[in-house]
Image (cartoon, grey):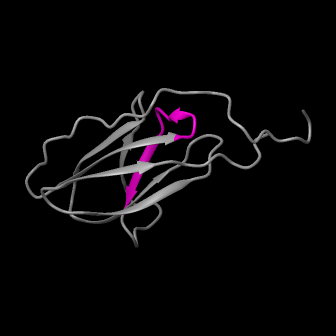
Amino acid sequence: MTGRCATSVHAKGPAPRLPHTPPVRVGFGAVVGTLSDSGGALPHYPILASTPGDAPNSPHASATADSLGGFVFDALPPGRYRLFVRAFAHRPDSTEIEVEAGRVDTVYLSPAFFDCVR
């Protein structure tokens, strides 16, 4: 199939499932979420949590999606974060979230497939 691109996905993964809500540590917030596409859960990809204005080489909190696409950040200091993921054959995806102490937020990341994967 040289020079042609597939625009449909034939693989079907498991349905994404949120992980259990973690206990929140005093003074911190938590985030639970799923990572999936139109075919189902995207397991084992890392999700980075960066704060606006961070230097590219500064350390970032990270979590890895489990076998059902669920991930947990269980102790983030309060503030604004951008959650960022790069999955093979998908466009990078991100979302912003405001983390508050004592609160657990839920996010859903759904990176889209590249238009053309060769």
Q: Which quadrant: the N terminus? A: top right
At 82% from the left and 41% from the top, the residue drawn is 5
Is residue 47 within the magenta segment? yes
Residue extending farthest to the right is 2
Instruction: Locate residue 41, reporting x and y percent.
Output: 48, 34
Instruction: Locate residue 110, reporting x and y percent.
Output: 51, 48
Nearest the viewer among 50 and 16 is 16
Instruction: Locate residue 95, reporting x and y percent.
Output: 43, 60
Left or right for 94, reference 26: right
Instruction: Locate residue 47, reporting x and y percent.
Output: 43, 47
Left or right for 51, reference 14: left
At 36% from the left and 65% from the top, the residue drawn is 51
At 61% from the left and 40% from the top, the residue drawn is 88
Nearest the viewer among 108 and 102 is 108
For the record, the magenta segment spans 37-50
Is residue 5 within the magenta segment? no
Residue extending farthest to the bottom is 53
- Residue 81 appears in which quarter of the rendering? bottom left
Residue 38 vertical placement versus 93 (above, below): above
Left or right for 3, reference 39: right
